[in-house]
C-alpha cells in the first residue's frame, strides 16, 4: 500500500516538472530573442553609418517578459547630415519572442525633427507606431499608425496637427519592381507664415513602377517609371475631390499625364492651392470662378479630366496649379 501511495505522489509531480521545463525553455527563448534584437539594432546602426547616416543611441534595455519581447532604445538619433535629423528620448521595439520577423516601433516621448530649409519641429503624438515585417510573398511590409499628433516649429511658432494617419507600404505581390502605398489621413492642419493648409480627409491608393530607379528622378524617367493613382479622395469643408490615372515625368522632371476626376464645390481646393503657392491670387480667383460655374452647370458635380503637361495642370479650361520639378 505504501509503494502505491509513493508512486501516486510521484505522478503528481510530473505535470509540475513539465511546466517547469517549459518555463525554463521559454525563458531561454525570450533571452535569446532579446539578445537577437540588441544585435539587430547594433548591425542596423553599423549599416546606416556605412551608408553615410549619423546614428547614435544610449542604453538598450529589454523587458516585457513573459508575454512580449520589448527593447527600449534610449536617446536614439539618426540624421542625414545637412538634410534632416530626428531624435527622441526613448524608442520602444516590440516583438513576439518566437517570431522576430515583425517589429513594432513606438514612442510616447517628444520627438524633434529638423529638416534643412524647414526648421526644427517639436512633435508629440498620442499614438505613434511603426511596424516592419518580413513577408514571403512581398519580401517586406511597412505600416504606420499615428494619432493625435501636434508639431510646433521653434523658429517662428508655426504649428501643425494631424488627427489620424494610417500608411501601408510594400512591394506588389505580382511584381517586385512595383511599390504600393495605401494612405488615409484625417484632420491635417498647417499654420505657417508661408503656407496655411487644412484638409478634413485624404485617402489614396498608389503604386510606383521601376522602384529600383527611384533614387534619381531622371533615372526613374528613363527607366519608364510611372505613378499609378488607383484612387485618390480628398475632403475639404463642403468640397469633395476624387481622381484616378497615371502620371510620368517629362524631360524637365515635372509630372505629366491625364487624371479622371470628379469634384464637388471646387472653391476650397483652389484656395488651398493658392495658399500653398501653386497658384497666384489672380489665377486662383479666375480658376475658382470658372470651376464653380462649370460645376453648377454640371448639376453640382464636375466630371472632367485634369491635364498635366508642360509644368502646369488644367481642369475644364482653367489653370489650377504650377507643377514642381523633381530634377
Image (cartoon, helix red, strand yellow):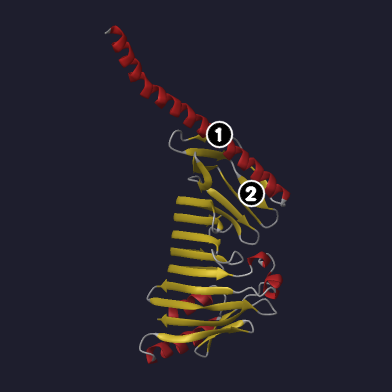
Q: Which residue is mark 2?
A: 78
How dense is the environment of label 1, judged by Cα within 10 Å: few (below 14), some, or many (20 and up)?
A: some
Q: Nearer the viewer, residue 190 or 95?
A: 95
Query: Please, what secondary structure does the residue beneath circle 1 have?
Result: helix
- The residue under the point 60% across, 70% down is 209
What residue is at 53 percent from the left and 32 percent from the top?
31
Mark 2 is surrounded, within 10 Å at the Cα level, by few (under 14), some (14 to 19) or many (20 or more) other residues, namely some
Name of the residue lying farthest toward the left? 1
Residue 180 visible in rendering: yes
Is 121 rendered above or below residue 188?
A: above
Q: Is residue 202 above or below residue 297?
A: above
x and y percentages locating residue 282 in the rendered image: 54, 85
Give percent across and percent down for residue 182. Answer: 49, 65
Q: Position of residue 100 (x, y in %)?
A: 53, 43
The Cα–Cα distance between marks 1 and 2, rounded to whole angstroms, is 27 Å
Q: Is residue 253 left or right of residue 164?
A: right
Q: Which residue does the numbered mark 1 point to in the structure image?
A: 32
Q: Quadrant of the C terminus?
A: bottom right
Residue reaching furthest to the bottom: 297
Amino acid at each position: 500500500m505504501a509503494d502505491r501511495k509513493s508512486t501516486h505522489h510521484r505522478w503528481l509531480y510530473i505535470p509540475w516538472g513539465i511546466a517547469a521545463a517549459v518555463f525554463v525553455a521559454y525563458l531561454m527563448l525570450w533571452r535569446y530573442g532579446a539578445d537577437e534584437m540588441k544585435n539587430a539594432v547594433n548591425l542596423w546602426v553599423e549599416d546606416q553609418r556605412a551608408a553615410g547616416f549619423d546614428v547614435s543611441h544610449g542604453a538598450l534595455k529589454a523587458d516585457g517578459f513573459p508575454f512580449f519581447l520589448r527593447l527600449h532604445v534610449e536617446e536614439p538619433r539618426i540624421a542625414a547630415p545637412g538634410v534632416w535629423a530626428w531624435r527622441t528620448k526613448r524608442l520602444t521595439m516590440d516583438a513576439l519572442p518566437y517570431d522576430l520577423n515583425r517589429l513594432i516601433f513606438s514612442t510616447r516621448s517628444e520627438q524633434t525633427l529638423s529638416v534643412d530649409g524647414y526648421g526644427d519641429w517639436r512633435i508629440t503624438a498620442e499614438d505613434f507606431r511603426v511596424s516592419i515585417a518580413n513577408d514571403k510573398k512581398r519580401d517586406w511590409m511597412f505600416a504606420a499608425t499615428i494619432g493625435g499628433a501636434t508639431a510646433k516649429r521653434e523658429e517662428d511658432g508655426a504649428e501643425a496637427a494631424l488627427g489620424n494617419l494610417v500608411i501601408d507600404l510594400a512591394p506588389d505581390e505580382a511584381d517586385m519592381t512595383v511599390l504600393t502605398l495605401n494612405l488615409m489621413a484625417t484632420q491635417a492642419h498647417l499654420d505657417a507664415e508661408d503656407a496655411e493648409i487644412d484638409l478634413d480627409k485624404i485617402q489614396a491608393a498608389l503604386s510606383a513602377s521601376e522602384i529600383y530607379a527611384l533614387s534619381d528622378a531622371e533615372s526613374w524617367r528613363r527607366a519608364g517609371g510611372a505613378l499609378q493613382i488607383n484612387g485618390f479622395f480628398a475632403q475639404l469643408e463642403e468640397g469633395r475631390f476624387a481622381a484616378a490615372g497615371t502620371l510620368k515625368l517629362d524631360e524637365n522632371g515635372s509630372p505629366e499625364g491625364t487624371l479622371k476626376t470628379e469634384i464637388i464645390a471646387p472653391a476650397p481646393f483652389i484656395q488651398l492651392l493658392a495658399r500653398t503657392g501653386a497658384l497666384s491670387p489672380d489665377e486662383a480667383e479666375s480658376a475658382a470662378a470658372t470651376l464653380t460655374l462649370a460645376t453648377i452647370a454640371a448639376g453640382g458635380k464636375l466630371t472632367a479630366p485634369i491635364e498635366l503637361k508642360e509644368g502646369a495642370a488644367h481642369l475644364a479650361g482653367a489653370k489650377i496649379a504650377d507643377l514642381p520639378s523633381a530634377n
